[in-house]
């Protein structure tokens, strides 16, 4: 009985099985590539997966996928494996067309291959890519890109089966990458369309806001926020042009450099092109400037109404996936449309504010003038014992200073001077309350009782932030005894020419309207013939000149002492002229009132 034969199969049979196994592996790889292209990942993720599968299938050690940009004639690396910082490679359109028609791998070690001229021109790029094979990625008549492969592991050569499999896998990869490009272009087109719609909607919304709002602040904030958002900027500021520089109407992300409401001199504003180009020439500009801490990008547009520049709109640092990018001409076009709306907003706000201010001033002057006419004396009393004169000059034509004379049935004369905190119509209205209340209470000959009751009335009638400094004195025309109360007012002065002595009237109490309680002390002073009494508000001594110096009490006392022998109307004329000469053209910010009384 013979044993079964154990002879080895022929070598041709072994090779056939290996090839079948290789083909099965190739089919599996193609299936994996098909799955990768339909997995729904991002473009970069899919490209990386395709490269990984191709390298693994062909046992290549390193590789990269580069996409072709026909506009710039350049191959741009998308993904790479085993290669640090793969370079971009210039690829002339003629060479790109040759690759598109080649449709099979190019062996860069072969003699006279179609990329020989390119390799010679840029050898460092090919060296950095460590390229051995270049496989064109083609769809129809378009070169999508290049698949670059290095040597295989162990530096074994690529077989004909490898090259055929590479061509097949490249077809799948080309179609996948091309589809991603098309989808990306469609998405970009949709994005641009939606952005245009959003821009138009924003311009429409800003237009509605301009029609509905008359205040600059909300409109300026709306405009700068939309400009920053729609241009993908990081920062922005809207200026209004005023005398003396640019006023910050609204800012976004730039409060430190451009504080809200701040008025910035033109020569101090950065970048300097705002003044030298935008304002000087009424032209927009886009800037890429290198500044301390890095570069900064600007888009700056003038705001023009009827040929006159009224402001500036500026946005900074356009953001992109790769960091900050330059503003485009398209960005400037949209910003120009928004600048037109902003210019209208600033001009409307200015005109509206002017109209409101004019109306307010007119009404205030009408009301205050009527009040002032009623409460101030028409003329000074004519008496045998004393001659009196009063002067009132309001910094707003009307104000919060008050003086008055009280004639009693008995031979007595009351003199009142007061100063209400604040200016303009509100102060004039409180003066009216003071005058009416005082006149109602003055019949009482008890000074302390009169002022105490008056204080309670003013406390109830005035807001907490208002008060009145008040001085009230009564002169007995027979005995020349002067009894007075000073309720927080500037101390009236008495000058005695015979001795050169000055007397102050300081006794009394706190200002009217500050508290609803308290008592007041009466001061008694015997007057003599020739004595000069001077009652005044702080607008007299605090009148300032162009050097910001005050007229002061010393100047007033010196003038009064020198003119004390004159009639009071002449003393008053000298005092008024001295104050006016001292002040000059400097604007005044307080009412000026005084009363002069000279004992005969």
Image (cartoon, grey):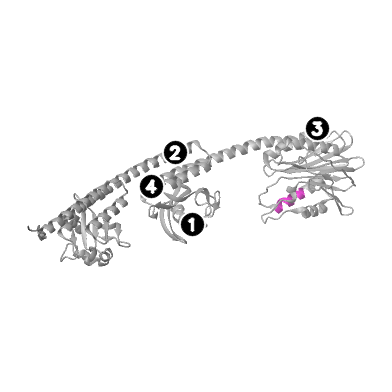
Name which of mark 1 and mark 2 comes first in the sequence.
Answer: 2
Q: Give the SS element for disc 3.
A: helix
Say whether marks 3 and 1 touch (CB < 8 Å): no
Q: Residues within 10 Å of mark 4 (few under 14, many from 20)?
A: few
Distance from the alpha carbon under mark 2 to that under mark 4: 18 Å
As rendered, which of 322 and 568 lies closer to the eye? Answer: 322
Q: Which residue is mark 1?
A: 270
Distance from the alpha carbon under mark 3 to that under mark 2: 59 Å
Residue 576 inside the magenta-drawn segment: yes
As rendered, which of 274 and 193 lies closer to the eye? Answer: 193
**Residue 454 appears left or right of 329:** right
Residue extending farthest to the right is 479
Distance from the alpha carbon under mark 3 to that under mark 1: 64 Å
Q: Which residue is mark 3?
A: 440
Q: Quadrant of the N terminus?
A: bottom left
Which residue does the image show at 40% across and 39% down from the upper left? 201
Say whether marks 3 and 4 touch (CB < 8 Å): no
As rendered, which of 465 and 34 lies closer to the eye? Answer: 34
- Give the foreground label among 3 and 1: 1
- Give the foreground label among 3 and 4: 4
Distance from the alpha carbon under mark 3 to that under mark 4: 71 Å
Q: Which residue is mark 2?
A: 205
Say whether marks 2 and 4 touch (CB < 8 Å): no
Q: Residues within 10 Å of mark 3 (few under 14, many from 20)?
A: few
């Amino acid at each position: 009985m013979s044993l079964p034969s154990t002879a080895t199969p022929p070598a041709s049979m072994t090779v056939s099985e290996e090839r079948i196994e290789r083909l099965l592996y190739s089919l599996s790889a193609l299936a994996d590539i098909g799955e990768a292209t339909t997995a729904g990942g991002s473009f970069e993720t899919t490209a990386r997966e395709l490269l990984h599968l191709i390298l693994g299938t062909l046992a290549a050690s390193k590789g990269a996928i580069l996409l072709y940009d026909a506009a710039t004639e350049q191959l741009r690396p998308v993904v790479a494996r085993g290669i640090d910082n793969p370079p971009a490679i210039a690829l002339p359109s003629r060479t790109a067309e040759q690759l598109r028609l080649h449709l099979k791998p190019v062996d860069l070690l072969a003699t006279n291959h179609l990329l020989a001229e390119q390799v010679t021109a840029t050898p460092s790029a090919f060296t950095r890519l460590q390229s051995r094979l270049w496989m064109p990625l083609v769809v129809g008549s378009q070169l999508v890109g290049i698949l670059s492969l290095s040597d295989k592991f162990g530096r074994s050569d690529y077989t004909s089966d490898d090259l055929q499999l590479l061509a097949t896998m490249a077809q799948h990869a080309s179609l996948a990458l091309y589809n991603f490009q098309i989808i990306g272009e469609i998405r970009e087109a949709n994005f641009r369309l939606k952005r245009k719609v959003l821009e138009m909607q924003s311009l429409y919304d800003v237009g509605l806001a301009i029609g509905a709002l008359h205040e600059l602040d909300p409109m300026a904030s709306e405009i700068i926020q939309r400009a920053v958002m729609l241009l993908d900027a990081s920062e922005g500021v809207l200026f209004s042009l005023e005398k003396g520089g640019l006023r910050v109407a609204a800012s976004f992300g730039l409060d430190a450099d451009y504080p809200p409401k701040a008025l910035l001199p033109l020569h101090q504003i950065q970048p300097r092109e705002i003044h030298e180009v935008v304002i000087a020439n009424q032209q927009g500009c886009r800037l890429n400037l290198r500044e301390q801490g890095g570069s900064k990008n600007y888009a700056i547009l003038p705001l023009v109404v009827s040929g006159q520049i009224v402001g500036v709109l500026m946005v900074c640092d356009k953001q992109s996936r790769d960091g900050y990018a330059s503003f485009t001409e398209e960005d400037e076009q949209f910003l120009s449309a928004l600048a037109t709306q902003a210019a209208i907003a600033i001009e409307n706000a200015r005109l509206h504010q002017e109209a409101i201010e004019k109306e307010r001033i007119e009404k205030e002057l009408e009301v205050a003038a009527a009040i002032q006419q009623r409460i101030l004396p028409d003329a000074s009393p004519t008496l045998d014992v004393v001659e009196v004169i009063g002067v009132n000059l309001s910094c707003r034509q009307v104000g919060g200073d008050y003086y008055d004379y009280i004639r009693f049935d008995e031979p007595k004369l009351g003199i009142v001077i007061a100063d209400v905190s604040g200016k303009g119509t509100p102060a004039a209205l409180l003066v009216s309350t003071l005058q009416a209340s005082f006149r109602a209470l003055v019949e009482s000959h008890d000074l302390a009782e009169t002022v105490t009751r008056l204080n309670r009335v003013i406390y109830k009638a005035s807001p907490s932030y208002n008060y009145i400094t008040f001085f009230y004195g009564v002169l007995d025309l027979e005995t020349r005894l002067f009894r007075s109360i000073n309720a927080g007012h500037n101390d009236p002065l008495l000058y005695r020419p015979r001795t050169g002595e000055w007397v102050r009237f300081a006794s009394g109490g706190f200002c009217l309207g500050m508290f609803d309680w308290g008592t007041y002390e009466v001061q008694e002073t015997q007057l003599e013939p020739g004595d000069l009494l001077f009652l005044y508000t702080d607008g007299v001594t605090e009148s300032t000149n162009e050097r910001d110096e005050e007229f002061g009490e010393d100047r007033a006392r010196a003038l009064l002492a020198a003119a004390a022998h004159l009639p009071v109307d002449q003393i008053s004329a000298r005092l008024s002229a001295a104050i006016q000469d001292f002040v000059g053209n400097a604007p005044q910010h307080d009412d000026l009132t005084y009363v002069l009384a000279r004992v005969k």
